[in-house]
Amino acid sequence: MAKKSVFKKLIWQKPAFQKGRKNPSILRITVRENETQVDLGYSSFTIYINGGWIRIHPDTYLEDIETGIHYKMTRADGIPIAPTQLHFKTKTDWQYFSLFFEPLPNKDLIINFIEPNILVPSDNGKNFDFYRIKLNIEDALEEY
Amino acid sequence: MGINRNAYLRYKAIDMRLRNRYCSAPDMEDLIAACGLAIDYRPSIETIQKDIKLMREQPPKGFAAPIKFCRRKLVYEYTDPSYSFDTIGLNNEDIEGIKKALEVINSIGTSRVSQQFSHSMGKVLSAYNEEFNDPSKNRKIIQTDQIPLYRGMDHFDLLFRACSEEIPVSVIHYSYTKMRFNVTVIHPRTLKEFENRWYIVGFSEDHESTRIFGLDRLYDPVLLKKAFIKELENEDLFLKDVYGVYQCENQKKQTIRIQANSMVTNYLMAYPLHPSQEVLKRLEYGNSEITYQLIPSYELIRLFRSYGKDIRVIEPQWMQKEINQ
């Protein structure tokens, strides 16, 4: 009888990616059986008044480059979903936040993290995109 | 003494009767008789019914006693035969000792340690209030620092478990000085409190050495299935040989010699800063020279500065300069 494979809860710390922003930084990606969690850290920019603001587009998704399958964002913790914004109070504020997506498969993957373009024209180019994030199983830690 | 022991004795009597395997399961009359023997008068049916109701209640109000009433046989029984309301016998001295300890814990506030501890102590304190409450003594005898809940304390239980079971933890850390996030794996050994702030000490994979992290700067710790790394030889640097938390860079354990005026000398002799404190000599007007064997820390320098002219650092020279700046 074939052995039923056990889904491993895998964690990648500071996963390598080919192209993307330094701020926010992708700190950790956790792949669980029921969801995928992406943890990010953001430090407010000094160029903006009082550090500016952040929000996440509701249609943000992860994309498996090999299959083209999109994994939708299901919820966000620590960051409001656009059009609501989190306004910083100073240029030295920071925000840790987690985004939750439909579960990725338990295998080696290269994914894109895509926040779709613009709710309003001024948002253009400010979206949080990361391309070709490498999630090799052998680089992963296993959750207890 | 305003201690209402009757309820406590009744609960114990009911518990003992329910656990007595040499008698058949008790009905209401049996429980009344058992309680009557314990308190020297016959309680009413209503009293016993109330007692059973309270014993069944979930903590902190009750004791989660799994008491079931069998409608067919009209008897009471425990659904969990291993349950016991009170497995420890306490004499009056024990009770007085516990009462004093509970007053201290009650004053400190359990929330500053952990949710789990708070919940556990909530059970004990509610039992304490139920059994030993004396309305004439509602005045608080002990006052301690009241620390509001602060960021990171919700990780306490997980980190405590990680330390005790030696489980590595993936943590996200925000550095106030570098103003940036980092993620690392800590192999945590000890939770340390200093000036009402909590820290975790352990080997950090990212730094490849033992480090200390403030709980307020940690986000989302996750336990990992991973071999645990111990770096025992460096733990003393963080736990024994330092006053405070953050050591001055590139400094080893060394002799720190200060001169203190008579007022500060009195304070330091009453409340030594560190076990290594030694009063080398007392001078004519009560001034003194005091030494410490410590790794210099920012908290130590801050403390010396806070005394102003009342303390003068004699050695090391660099610290003398730093404080006089």
Image (cartoon, coloured by chain):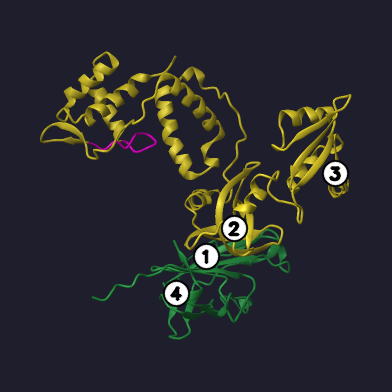
Chain colours: A green, B yellow
Secondary element type, mark 2: strand
The answer to whether residue B303 is left or right of residue B99 is right
What chain letter is assigned to the residue under label 4? A
Secondary element type, mark 4: strand
Q: Which mark is residue B65?
A: none
Q: Which mark is residue B203?
A: 2
Quadrant position of residue B196: top right
What distance separates the C-alpha of mark 3 from that of mark 2?
A: 32 Å
- Nearer the observer: mark 4 or 1; the answer is 1
What chain letter is assigned to the residue under label 2? B
Secondary element type, mark 3: strand
Pinpoint residue B254: horizontal percent, then vertical percent.
77, 46
Pinpoint residue A82: horizontal percent, then vertical percent.
54, 69
What distance separates the C-alpha of mark 1 from that of mark 3?
A: 49 Å
> Is residue A67 positioned above or below A92 on the image?
below
Pinpoint residue B129: horizontal percent, then vertical percent.
43, 27
Pinpoint residue A50: horizontal percent, then vertical percent.
70, 62
Residue tagged 4: A72
The answer to whether residue A100 is left or right of residue B267 is left
Which amino acid type is marked by label 1? Answer: Ser
Same chain for mark 3 and mark 2? The answer is: yes
Same chain for mark 3 and mark 4? The answer is: no
Residue tagged 1: A98
Residue numbers of the magenta segment: B57-67
- Examine the rendering and report whether any part of residue B140 can be seen: yes
Residue tagged 3: B315
Which amino acid type is marked by label 3? Answer: Glu
The residue at 43%/82% (across/down) is: A69
The residue at 42%/31% (across/down) is: B126
What chain letter is assigned to the residue under label 1? A
